[in-house]
Amino acid sequence: MLNASQIYEYNQERVAVSHMDELLLESVTDNNSKIIESAGMKKIRHLSRAIGNSLKVIYGYRCQICGEFIGEKYGSTLIHAHHIDYFTRSLNNNSDNILIVCPNHHGIIHDCNPIFDKKSKMYIYSNGFKEGLKLNKHI
């Protein structure tokens, strides 16, 4: 259970990132993941890339939705880590809130903003289209 001070800090962190673009925030480089304190006790949470990078390795750089390793023929390990509940709203960087997706699915998710049903492991789009995970080792 969170105490009043922790709830206040959480809300402050939430406000600090709420105006940021999710795709931009996901692309921020993480050299020294940590919480930074400055005068006035404002804390800013930096994303730890280690979780997403570990999941990329677990999935062999394949998209959890389509199962494709799109960079293989090019000798590239291009793949994205996507927060199911956007980090800018949830501040949740836990592995159970991260999917490994190809750039195409990542772009579609951000463009259409479908609902992810964690029980069925499926995205539900506003037009009624449903798309589940082909690969799942952690959610």
Image: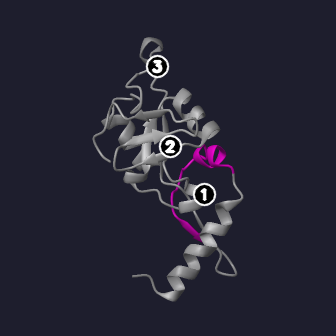
- Residue 46: quarter of image: bottom right
Regarding residue 114, the answer to whether it shows in the image is: yes
Q: Indicate the amino acid at tag 2.
A: His
Q: Indicate the amino acid at tag 3.
A: Gly
Of the residues under marks 3 and 2, which one precedes in the sequence? 3
Pointer 2 and pointer 1: residues touching (CB < 8 Å)?
A: no
The x, y position of residue 125, in whole percent, is 54, 38
Dot 1 lies on which element? helix
Give the extent of the magenta segment: 21-36
Q: Which residue is mark 3?
A: 71
Dot 3 lies on which element? loop
Query: Could you tell me which residue is drawn at 44 percent across and 11 percent down?
Result: 73
23 relative position to 97: left or right: right
Query: Could you tell me which residue is drawn at 58 percent across and 35 percent down?
Result: 127
Query: Could you tell me which residue is drawn at 50 percent across and 81 percent down?
Result: 6
Tag on residue 88?
A: 1
